[in-house]
Image: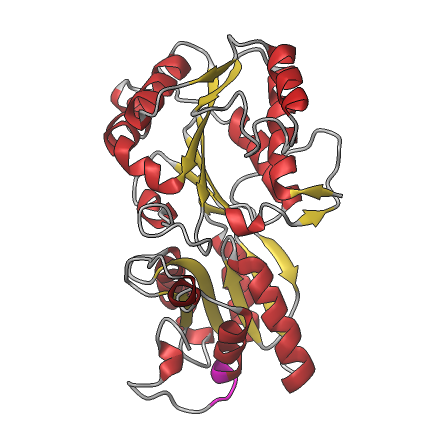
Amino acid sequence: MMTYIAAIGAAQREAMAADKRVIIFGEDVEANVYGTTGGSKTRAEQGDFVQEFGRSRIRNTPIAEEAMVGTAIGAAMTGLRPIVDLSYSNFLYMAMDQFVNQAAKNRYMFGGQSSIPVVFRSAMFYGLNTAAHHSDRPYPMFMNVPGLKVVVPASASDAKGLLRTAVDSNDPVLIFEAVPLWGLKEEVDENEYRIPFGVARVRREGEDVTVVAISGCVPLALAAAEQVASTRGISAEVIDPRTLVPLDTKTILDSVRRTGRLIITEPAHRTCGAAAEIAAIVVEQAFEALRAPVLRVTAPDMQIPFSPVLEAELYPTADKIAAAITRVCSNKPFSADDPAKGAVP
């Protein structure tokens, strides 16, 4: 058994041992427990990790995200393969110019003569009372930037395999880790393996409704599926896209064409989210198969309060997802003010 965060650390350790071009840098990466050292808790273990690979390959940086991202892009263009730990995902905003105008565009701007093999890790600390400046889930905005790959692992085994694929990629990859998942454990292959991008994982098979769950909403959707199966006899299929760019549209469309119903749930805001994009794809390509409106269960479009009680009300829960499943399978007409059509059914 391995935790999600330990799986991230194991993948980084494997990558560094296999390829001397792989380097890690970020804020306090020599001594943090957020995955650099495999989730180790002791200073001795952390010191062993640094000693094993040397300070030339594991570097602490100043608190300067634009410099960190720009340095990584330059290092990648000279042949290295950096992994950058950006800590809180809100910190990505400080480096937007580097992400959008350099990392995403350089291969195109140089006519394919350069590649940008960089992995950017960031943690989404939502639901942990870290207030508005530290609680964002910003992966949807990066889906809108051609040239970036966007990865949202929802399990330990996927986190390890997707990170190894990310390190192998010659394009910039952003990995968004939901911190509420960091402590979840599952069996993880201790040998090297990779999970290809653009291949969704059907976490539960079902016949009545398709639930596409993103990042931290995956375990919630699975719990909701169990709930409606036991209380209402509804068979819900739960799909984890694993990567949003590229997105496995085929698996989603095939499922919707079979079930005739679709719910998408994610922890990000409602407007222009990944759920909105997936809904649009299904309506454009499989409208004839739908037997009910497409529903989204997301966070509302508002800033995150510091109050634990207020914050807890914002995000999808198993009960909210179960309510949406029940509503979409009821075959009753929807009204304009139906609460099931909102962000929080």
Q: Is residue 200 left or right of residue 245?
A: right
Residue depicted at x 40% and y 59%: 278
Q: Is residue 89 left or right of residue 331?
A: left
Residue depicted at x 62% and y 22%: 46
Position of 18 relative to 171 (above/below): above
Using the image as rendered, state which of residue 184 and residue 237 is in the foreground. 184
Position of 221 relative to 90 (above/below): below
**Picture quarter with the N terminus:** top right
Using the image as rendered, state which of residue 14 and residue 41 is in the foreground. 41
Across and down, in percent, residue 66 comes to 28, 26
Across and down, in percent, residue 331 comes to 48, 89
Q: Give residue 65's quadrant in the image.
A: top left
Region in magenta: 327-331
State the predominant SS element of the stretch in magenta.
Answer: loop
Count of numbered circles on the image: 0
Position of 64 relative to 245 (above/below): above
Across and down, in percent, residue 74 comes to 34, 14
